[in-house]
Image (cartoon, rainbow, N blue to C red):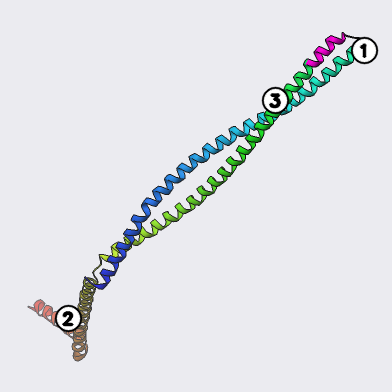
Amino acid sequence: MSLFKRLFTLGKAEANAVVDKLEDPIKMTEQGIRDMKKDLEGCLKAMAEVKALAIRSRNEIREQQERGVDYEKKAMLLLQKAESGQMDSAEADRLATEALNKKVECETHVERASGEQTQFDQNVSKLEVNVKTLRSKISSWENELKTLKARVKVATATKNLNKQMASIDSSDTISMLERMKEKVEQEEALADAYGDIANESKSLDDEIDKAIGGSTTVAASDSLAALKAKMSKSKEA
């Protein structure tokens, strides 16, 4: 085997090895990206649900705070009516006490909802970090996948080129070119030979015509005169 062929055979083997090593990472990266996108969808859904709970807690806090203020106002109105004699003092005290108890319940709800909101906000913050991390990793892996696919294309092209080049035998190619060169030279020599023959034939005719000094025209005139004489003799006879 020639050195040329050995070199390209070695190159082909290296290209095949590169392709074999790249195929699995590409598949693994693609699967990893799909899995991470599913995880990202799950995180986004969970974050939306937790945010919804946080919003409900804030709404509940505002609602309970407003109710607490309202119960306190009602208790004050009841006491004012008792003072003005519009209602029994004992009844007013009883109802005002119930209103204040309701206010305490509202305050309890506010405290509970505030704790829940704090917890929900913390969960949202953690989920936002996870979403950001997943998005960053997905972007990084997608870029890596593009690089791997580009390397596969280069390695495949190199493999195909080396495979094609390795199948070429330089000695056979040179021998074929020499035979073609010899054939072309032979055809060119044959063309020159026919040209020389044609020129020689033409030159010989020119020499003959020159030597007889236009005798072709004279001979034609003599023949015409002889024919006329012959025809005259025929008439006389």
Q: Which residue is mark 2?
A: 224
Look at the magenta stretch and give its main secondary structure: helix
Q: Which residue is mark 1?
A: 84
Residue in the foreground of this view, choosing between 11 and 92: 92
For the record, the magenta segment spans 86-97
Residue 30 position in % (x across, y down): 43, 47
Q: Residue furthest top?
A: 88
**Do the residues under discs 3 and 1 have CB atoms within 8 angstroms?**
no
- Disc 2 marks which amino acid? Leu
**Quarter of the image where one finds residue 118:** top right
Mark nearer the N terminus (3 vs 1): 1
- Disc 1 marks which amino acid? Ser
Residue ID at (40%, 48%): 28
The span from disc 3 to disc 1 (Cα, nearest Å) is 34 Å
Residue 146 vs 77, above or below: the answer is below
Q: Which residue is mark 3?
A: 109
Residue ID at (55%, 47%): 133
Can residue 63 be seen from the camera position used here? no
Residue ID at (58%, 36%): 47
